[in-house]
Image: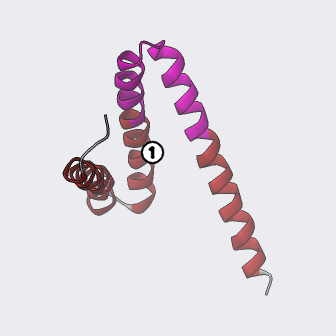
């Protein structure tokens, strides 16, 4: 069976709202602490959220939750490192001009 138009729009709306709330949950750390501390706390918060969601989804799909958490956290760590060093590289490029 297909989904009704109403179900599709409700799903789209709920997806948007949940992503918006998760995104907003990172802001308090940036407002309450110095920028460097806020960034570290946001990274820790991101790891926690990712771990919880990975666990829930893995359990629901009857997969190994520990494997899913390690996989997703590892990817997140790699993305953070690449982004950080790419930012440094771009910063140096513009400082040379």
Reply yes or no: does residue 39 show up in magenta: no
Q: Which sits in the foreground, 49 or 30?
A: 49
At horizontal 22% and vertical 47% (from top left) the residue drawn is 7
At horizontal 28% and vertical 63% (from top left) the residue drawn is 31
SS type, badge 1: helix
Work out which quarter of the rendered image holds the N terminus and state it.
top left
At horizontal 53% and vertical 32% (from top left) the residue drawn is 73
Q: Which sits in the foreground, 63 or 69?
A: 63
Where is residue 38, by image quadrant? bottom left
Q: Which residues are magenta?
A: 50-77
The residue carrying mark 1 is 43
Where is residue 51, by image quadrant? top left
* Dominant secondary structure of the residues highlighted in magenta in the image: helix
Work out which quarter of the rendered image holds the C terminus and state it.
bottom right
Q: Is residue 92 above or below residue 37?
A: below
Give x and y (percent) for residue 42. 39, 48
Q: Is residue 63 left or right of residue 30?
A: right
């Amino acid at each position: 069976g297909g989904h009704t138009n109403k179900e599709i729009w409700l799903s789209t709306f709920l997806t948007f709202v949940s992503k918006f709330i998760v995104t907003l949950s990172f802001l308090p750390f940036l407002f309450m602490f110095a920028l460097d501390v806020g960034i570290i706390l946001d990274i820790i918060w991101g790891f926690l959220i990712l771990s919880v969601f990975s666990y829930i989804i893995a359990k629901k799909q009857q997969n190994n939750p520990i494997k899913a958490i390690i996989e997703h956290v590892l990817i997140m760590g790699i993305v953070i490192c690449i982004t950080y060093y790419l930012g440094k590289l771009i910063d140096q490029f513009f400082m040379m001009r």
